[in-house]
Amino acid sequence: MPRTRLTTLVLGASGFIGSAVARQLASSDHNRAIGFVRSNPANGGIDGVRYVVGDASDLSTLYRAMSDVDTVICCVSYVGDDGQRCTEVNDRGIRNVASVASDIGVDRLIHVSTASVYGTGPFRDLPVDGAPLKPHSLASCSRVAGERHIRGAGGLVIRPHLVYGPGDRWFMPGLTSIVGKLGALIDEGSALLSTIHVDRLAYEIVALAQTPEVASPGTVMHLNEPEPTSVHDLLTREHRQTGWPVPGRSLDRSTAVARAQQLGISRRHIDMISLDHWFRNDRGVH
């Protein structure tokens, strides 16, 4: 049974996943929620969340934020192509988080990473650590380093794959952009991808925070929906929700790779939407 009125700190509480986690915590009678942000939310933030301004690069603000909390949920990440920022945020910043959490002795440390640390695939029903970590992007390489810091401090690492829902600026916008530039699906959109709605991901993370005995220190878990979804079905859902026009033609993968090169679309992005990337789930997400 969860303890009464746990105090939980969410690092990166203004981000896509972090804000969903903060909302979930604020809706629970068992939690006091503190949001760690780089600047106060312009709209006042989420009701029930107390905000603390700071930066993961600043040890003093981390110490102040983590003092007198039971659980730390780290949703801090940088996913762009700036190598220096990748190192500063995903490696050194997470190292600071792990160091302070270990020094203070918080009861539970959870870090949201990504299944992209495995590389480009294909992957089918891949268990945790069922393949070597072969990150291809600067961001993913630095997130591998961040995972090591968290695991070394006895924290739990969560690896979702593709997260969608309100506030998504990367997955579905990226998918529709690539397919739109190609003007076609690849192999009828048959590639299978592990995905999870951001609110479902937040629910599962908070459940893990409230029941720490479910995972041993230094554990890694996959969190996705139980079954993968085809690219075709993802785009069909997008069409129903937004009217985005699904292309009526399809290219085979080899033709799509050649076409993408002409259009300046990276091979990595083509691989991500034309090869299976699905991962064995470690929770009963439904």
Image (tube, helix red, strand yellow):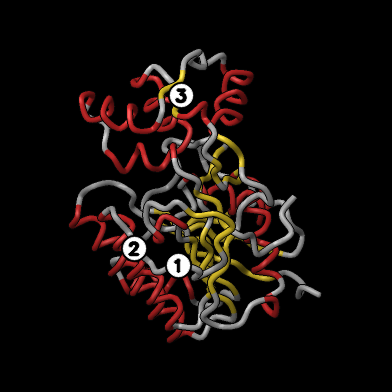
Q: Residue at x 44, y 26 (%)?
A: 176
For the N terminus, the quadrant is bottom right
- Which callout, 3 or 2, points to the residue nearer the camera? 3
Q: Which residue is mark 2?
A: 134
Say which element carries label 3: strand
Judging depth in this view, the residue of 271 and 158 nearest the camera is 271
Please, what is the three-letter code of the amino acid marked with disc 3? Answer: Leu
C-alpha gap between disc 1 and disc 2: 9 Å
Say which element carries label 1: loop
Residue 280 in the image: above or below residue 184: below
Q: Position of residue 70 (x, y in %)?
A: 60, 76
Q: Position of residue 31 (x, y in %)?
A: 69, 64
Judging depth in this view, the residue of 35 and 196 nearest the camera is 196
C-alpha gap between disc 3 and disc 2: 27 Å
Q: Residue at x 48, y 29 (%)?
A: 187
Q: Which numbered disc, 3 or 2, marks the residue that appears first in the sequence?
A: 2
Q: Residue at x 26, y 29 (%)?
A: 258
Q: Residue at x 46, y 47 (%)?
A: 15
Contact? badges 3 and 2 (CB < 8 Å): no
Say which element carries label 2: loop
Q: Position of residue 93 (x, y in %)?
A: 32, 67
Q: Is residue 32 found left or right of 183 in the rendered image?
A: right
Q: Which mark is residue 131?
A: 1
Contact? badges 1 and 2 (CB < 8 Å): yes
Q: Which residue is mark 3?
A: 185
Q: Which mark is residue 270?
A: none
Farthest residue to the right: give it.
1
